[in-house]
């Protein structure tokens, strides 16, 4: 097990996610808030990096990860505190694990880096809704002097 992250369900229960030894997304969750834990179980997938999980505006958790082919894949709870959808791709040719944020209007936004150092992002068009096309933000620069950001 490697690359763990944790998120809080809408009802307050914590849920821990990790990349399993078989590169599947595995998870365990509190059976009630402030209570014991479920057994670890697999949600499938072929992860190539650390998963990222965020809670949508409607309370559903959504998990993201890149795969060996560099695509970003995601899955989400069908309803808050509930079971999970199948994995679906958001495409891309990416090289870093995703980083998530929620915009003030409730839309999730995902940030990742490509092999060519371009920083890419994709966002929900509306809260809890479908996804935009990929957009380039700039390039990530690393050198002996340190790391920095360069606008396009």
Image (cartoon, helix red, strand yellow):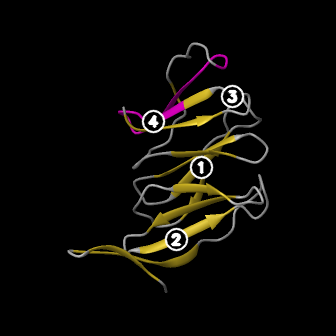
Q: Which residue is mark 2?
A: 120
Q: Secondary structure at mark 1?
A: strand
Identified at 42% across, 69% down, the residue is 114
Distance from the alpha carbon under mark 1 to that under mark 2: 16 Å
**Where 86 falls versus 90 (above or below)?**
above
Label 1 neighbour load within 10 Å: few <14, some 14-19, many 20+: many
Residue 74 among those drawn in magenta: no
Query: Quick one: SS at disc 2?
Result: strand
Quick one: 33 or 67, which is closer to the camera?
A: 33
Q: Is residue 124 above or below residue 51?
A: below
Q: CA distance from mark 1 to mark 3?
A: 22 Å
In this figure, which residue is indicated by the disc labeled 1? 74
Q: Position of residue 22 (x, y in %)?
A: 37, 35
Q: Residue under label 4, please give it.
A: 18
Q: Earlier in the sequence, mark 4 or mark 3?
A: 3
Precedes in sequence: disc 4 or disc 2: 4
Q: Quadrant of residue 133?
A: bottom right
The residues colored magenta run 16-33
Question: Of residues 151 and 45, which is closer to you in this image?
Answer: 151
Q: Nearer the viewer, mark 1 or mark 2?
A: 2
- Considering depth in this image, is 80 or 115 the residue closer to the camera? 80
| Quadrant of the image occupied by residue 38 | top right
Spatial CA distance of label 2 from label 3 is 32 Å
Image location (x, y in percent) of residue 83:
69, 30
């Amino acid at each position: 097990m490697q690359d763990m992250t944790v998120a809080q369900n809408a009802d307050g229960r914590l849920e821990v996610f990790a990349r399993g030894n078989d590169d599947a997304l595995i998870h365990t969750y509190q059976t009630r808030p402030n209570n014991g834990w479920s057994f670890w179980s697999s949600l499938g997938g072929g992860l190539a990096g650390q998963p990222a999980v965020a809670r949508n505006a409607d309370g559903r958790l959504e998990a993201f990860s890149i795969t060996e082919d560099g695509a970003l894949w995601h899955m989400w709870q069908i309803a808050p505190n509930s079971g999970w959808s199948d994995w679906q791709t958001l495409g891309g040719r990416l090289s870093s694990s995703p980083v998530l944020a929620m915009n003030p209007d409730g839309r999730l936004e995902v940030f990742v880096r490509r092999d060519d150092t371009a920083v890419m992002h994709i966002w929900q068009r509306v809260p809890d809704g479908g996804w935009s096309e990929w957009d380039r933000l700039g390039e990530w620069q690393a050198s002996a002097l340190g790391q920095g950001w360069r606008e396009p």
